[in-house]
Image (cartoon, coloured by chain):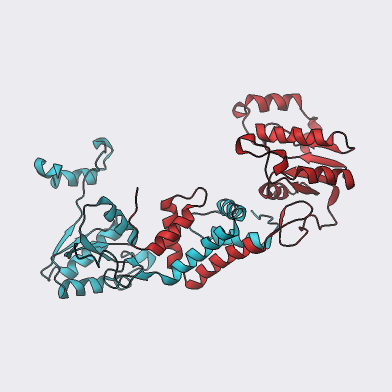
Chain colours: A cyan, B red
Amino acid sequence: MHQNYSSKLLEEAVEEFASLPGIGRKTALRLVLFLLKQDNMIVERFGNTIMKMKKEIMHCRICHNISDTEICNICGDNYRDHELVCVVENIRDVMSIENTQQYSGIYHVLGGIISPIDGIGPADLSIDSLVEKAEKNNIREVILALSTTMEGDTTNFYIYKKLKNTRVIVSTLARGVSIGDDLEYADEVTLGRSILNRTKFEDSFR
Amino acid sequence: MHQNYSSKLLEEAVEEFASLPGIGRKTALRLVLFLLKQDNMIVERFGNTIMKMKKEIMHCRICHNISDTEICNICGDNYRDHELVCVVENIRDVMSIENTQQYSGIYHVLGGIISPIDGIGPADLSIDSLVEKAEKNNIREVILALSTTMEGDTTNFYIYKKLKNTRVIVSTLARGVSIGDDLEYADEVTLGRSILNRTKFEDSFR
């Protein structure tokens, strides 16, 4: 539906917000009208913060995570286990794993997963630099922590093949029934896998 | 939950988006990561468009609608009926009514409705300028098109009292069952009103 904006300036601002994913015209208009009600200073800060972020942000030279410095906090942290590398799809996955507070190794951000439909092949991802790192540096174990989708499994397998002739141990996240889930709602594949890969009762308390 | 952002720049940009209404941290992060993937030029345009809008936008001197010029398109349009004024709460309501393509008069944007809970009294709204306009200009009819809430009704009544001693006709939007609605889902007040204010069958086709 064509909207009658009484102002070109307003319309352009709405178009900008509506170009963001998951934001429709109605929401965009609501956001723009909200900003219009704020002080000039607040809107200036909004615009400048986003432009500054885009201009100055870097990718860590080692793990490709987003960083304000050439080497990110995690790779620069000497208390972490630099022989343990967790391979993830994107920086959001780094945040998710960091939030568990259960991991003390470093990361390797692929920047995507192999997906022929989207035209993403192994060459588009930072897989070569992972293999190179695994061969040169003193890496003990690589944990593959990609999505449990077909694309994730494909990528896992591709990386596994690349690494299986090195002395690096390749592991993957445990698959099983979610904690807090009712058994009857678990899907069959997950439930079947959780029986095959059952853990010792004592270990389930760790 | 505390998020471990690996970048202060990223965190600040997420905070800016999360300060908008209806946008949580997760959505904000998604939007920021989307912008991060775009070209520098696109992000610059995003920021600059919003700051420009805030800096340059004006309110029409006559109807208080948002405008790029001192007098908005609608008030400046000589083909419209300038003796018919529709009173609305905000500029979004102007757009909604314009979209119906059923109205050819001009508008008066109050900038809110009387709401003691939110500390908004008649003095905070452009009611005085409406009354002044109704008295001085050649206005025939004022249509009150505010929300059908208690606050809307209060404001309607306040304006009605202010105008009842002028020669201006004060009218209000028809209340009734929505077109396309099943009768059983209409609320009792609306349904009751639609019986009392029934229209001639011939008129329902207009």
Quarter of the picture containing the C terminus of chain A is top left
Up/down of B98 relative to B9, above or below:
above
Between residue A145 and residue B8, name the one nearer to us.
B8
- The spot of residue B182 in percent (x, y) is 61, 31
Is the residue A62 above or below the residue B162 in the image? Answer: below
Q: What's the residue at 67%, 43% (across, down)?
A: B112
Between B116 and A163, the one lying in front of the other is B116
In the picture provided, is A106 more to the left or to the right than B98? left
Is B152 situated above or below A51?
above
- In the image, residue B204 lies at what x, y percent? 77, 35
Q: How many marks?
A: 0
Is residue B138 left or right of A169 when viewed as pictured?
right
**Quarter of the view holding residue A138:** bottom left
Which corner quadrant of the image does residue B194 belong to? top right
Q: Is residue B203 visible?
A: no
Residue B62 locus on image (x, y percent): 79, 53
The image shows residue A167, relative to residue A6, as above or below, that is below
Relative side of A187 to A84, left or right: right
Q: Residue at x 30, y 60 (%)?
A: A151
How far from the left and from the top, in percent, is residue B91?
68, 50
Q: Look at 58% across and 62% down and name the residue there.
A: B50
User: Is residue A57 among the parts visible in the rendering?
Assistant: yes
Pick the residue in front: B156 or A134.
B156
